[in-house]
Amino acid sequence: KQEVTQIPAALSVPEGENLVLNCSFTDSAIYNLQWFRQDPGKGLTSLLLIQSSQREQTSGRLNASLDKSSGRSTLYIAASQPGDSATYLCAVRPDSGAGSYQLTFGKGTKLSVIP
Amino acid sequence: ETGVTQTPRHLVMGMTNKKSLKCEQHLGHNAMYWYKQSAKKPLELMFVYSLEERVENNSVPSRFSPECPNSSHLFLHLHTLQPEDSALYLCASSQDVSYGYTFGSGTRLTVV
């Protein structure tokens, strides 16, 4: 059974700092990995999607990397801003079989960026 | 809006009530999902519909009943719920396995 772990569970940084969020998964047979952002009481907003054949994806100040063989992904946020404060979720999709539609989520990292 | 619309945004219901949650997407996606998000737990998949046919049901209690009348609409019918069913219920859609999920804003359900 796939398990996804996100470390740290919470992170507080001063504005302007660069930071890294970590995601690890136990089964490397994944089709893709997706990073989401969730604001309190709201739905999920997709940030980046990395296919299993890719090593990284970039969008603005965000960069996500994937090392499928070691079961790890990182989300790098450059020059953090107070508006980045949210919970960041990592999710993986299996590469085949029954359940290939199902995402397995981590519990998330709650990020606070202090002005 | 993200392209996936959920209504209502908030719902308070008694344990004997019957209510329904609605989800609508006009992204042309062919799969829709219901997820449950409880405090301090990872998102849990409840139901998956692909091409309007239910393909997975992760042993969800029968007091939750999904309905997918067409590829754009998904419902979650609720009856005789328990207080522990209070949670954020999220709908999502996707197009095939190659693409990512798009989530709605969720329905915050409180069972009293």
Image (spheres, coloured by chain):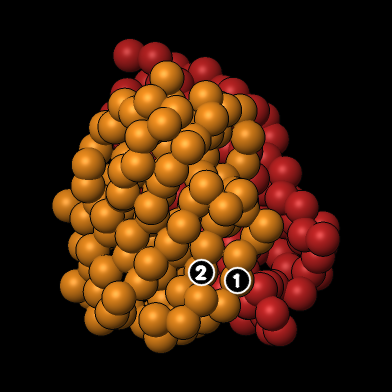
Chain colours: A red, B orange
Q: For this view, does B108 lie left or right of residue B85?
A: left
Residue type for callout 1 = Glu
Residue at (63%, 77%) from the top-left corner? Answer: A100
Q: For this view, does B64 lie left or right of residue B28?
A: right
Residue, disc 1:
B56
| CB contact under 8 Å: marks 1 and 2 | yes
Circle 1 marks a residue in which chain?
B
Residue at (38%, 25%) from the top-left corner? Answer: B14
* Residue B1: percent from left, percent from top: 17, 52
Q: Is B98 above or below relative to B24?
A: below
Residue, disc 2:
B48
Q: Residues within 10 Å of mark 2 (few under 14, many from 20)?
A: many
Residue type for callout 2 = Val
Figure quadrant of the C terminus of chain B: top left
Callout 2 secondary element = strand
Residue at (45%, 50%) from the top-left corner? Answer: A36
Label 1 and label 2: CA atoms lie apart by 5 Å
Callout 1 secondary element = strand
Residue A79 falls in which quadrant of the image? top left
Residue at (31%, 49%) from the top-left corner? Answer: B20
